[in-house]
Amino acid sequence: PIDDFTRIEDLPDHVDETVTLKGWLHNKRGSKGLYFLILRDGSGFVQCVAAEDNLDDTSWTAADDASQEAALAITGSVSADDRAPGGYEIQVSSIETVGSSGDYPITPKEHGIDFLMNNRHLWLRSESQWAVMRIRNRTIMAIHEFFQDRGFIQMDAPILTGNAVEGTSTLFELDYFDDQSAYLTQSGQLHGEAMAMALGKIYTFGPTFRAEKSKTRRHLTEFWMIEPEMAFYDLDMDMELAEQFVSHVVQTVLADCKAELETLQRDTEALENVQAPFPRVSYDEAVDILRSDETAEMIDERIESIKQEKEDLETEKEENQKERGQAKKWRKRQIDQREIEINKRIDEIEEELRNLPDWKESAQTFEWGNDFGGSDETVLTWHYDRPIIVHRFPAKIKAFYMKRDPEDDRLALGMDVLAPEGYGEIVGGGERATDLDFLEEQIEAHGLPQEVFDWYLDLRKFGSVPHSGFGLGLERTVSWLCGREHVRETIPFPRTIGRLHP
Ligand code: 4AD
Ligand code: MG
């Protein structure tokens, strides 16, 4: 091995041995002659017990001086201890300071989101962000495994493109040479279609860009998309692949990221249910569901139940405050920590209570032909216990390349996978149009320049076949898996309309 130290995640293999760990000081508690140091090294967290009696002066001074995020090399013996966080503990025999740390800005107290985002480069070191980034990593690997096991070829679509894919309103344009314009890609799909005609089944995995001008919890301007494209697949096959794919990713993360999900206090029950098949709901049916009395009742029930939850939380808070006066130090900390959680949840509830009347209005007055808003998607999924696939949308609200439904020319053979628990659309895709004349018409009707699509139209001239595909948004998927409210926490350095720094 290259490492001359042990990783925290490997401690179970070293019980009763002496090891050296290298990492950063996450937290420190202590009293006279004794410190409990929580060390983190990226692979995990472990409590190290440093007793003055067992250490030489240099080591004890290092323990004494170490403040949050100091880099340390700690040597000691490993013991298994069920009471210790993570199940293992280090009895320290020596400590060396690798890099000291000053007034670390991110303390265990509560910070506002802008502060945390401005300090994203440091915030990444927190326990919650550690968990999110590891789940993102496992998700990425599960995606590759899924496609590689099924004979798909990974392709890299270009990032600089000469054509729009998903409409012109969200294009990032830049100067290319000789007065040409280029765009940052919105989607690798069109190039993926070319590659599918060459290699059969492909998937792209790359960054995509959209100049999203509104701030929402689901939109980034730079996000990662996975786009499979399959020759000889129709819409039904496309939906079947999407549900197997999403189930695989969710079940893999559930199985392999238990510690991370627990750190995030993710309620995993709803994720256990994510097993194919997912209910198929046509757009027409979805509209009826939104306008139904049942939906209105569900929203009313939701209002009542979160009002009750808020009351219960407020009672708990009062009782905790009464106890706090006489409580021991550790219990005080616990109460303060819990209060942060309670306040956060109460804020969420209050926001939802403000929004629910509008959600109800939007659902009940929904008009055929419109696109679903975020709240409509949320309410729709309340009717089911797992993700759903909505299919056959009005062609008017979909991209130029979608095939029309042969049964009803107003409809496009598109499909969206909607995640439950308010996470909304995680997948968009469908069957592609193959008719050359139809595509030429559509390009014109969508106000797109014919000449940049010549290569795309060639695909319909030389052995054109039925084909389908879809795109999964990585950050939306990870935020759902992690139970995080906002996509900005699921990418290391998020880019949104007001954020290019750090
Ligand atoms: O539904 P979209 O726009 O579909 C496409 O781009 C197709 N070309 C995909 C295909 O058929 N190959 O985007 C696909 C997914 C969405 O369902 C969502 O998960 C994610 O990409 N997405 C975003 N994620 C974060 N921020 C944004 N601004 C996003 N826009 C789309
Ligand atoms: Mg979409």
Image (cartoon, rainbow, N blue to C red):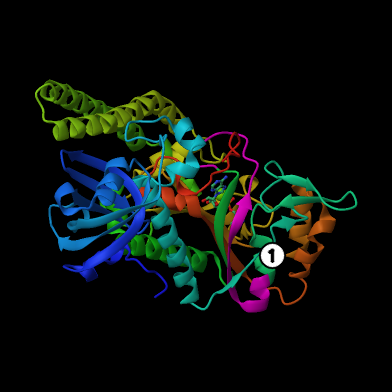
Callout 1: 10 Å neighbours few (<14), some, many (20+)? some
Q: Is residue 201 above or below residue 478?
A: below
Q: What residue sits right under mark 1 in the picture?
A: 191
Check disc 1 and report its element: helix, strand or loop.
Answer: helix
Q: Is residue 415 visible?
A: no
In the image, what residue type sits under mark 1? His
Picture quarter containing residue 65? top left
Q: Please state if 346 lies on the left or on the right of 119 as rendered.
A: left
Q: Is residue 313 above or below residue 5?
A: above
Q: Please state if 18 lies on the left or on the right of 121 as rendered.
A: left
- Residue 365: percent from left, percent from top: 48, 30
Query: In which quadrant of the rendered image does the N terminus lie?
Result: bottom left
Q: How many marks?
A: 1
- Residue 125: percent from left, percent from top: 40, 47
What's the residue at 37%, 60% (across, down)?
Answer: 250
- Residue 498: percent from left, percent from top: 59, 33
Q: Please state if 473 lies on the left or on the right of 447 as rendered.
A: left
Q: Is residue 475 above or below residue 144?
A: above
Query: In which quadrant of the rendered image does the C terminus lie?
Result: top right
207 part of magenta stretch:
yes
Q: Which residues are magenta?
A: 195-219
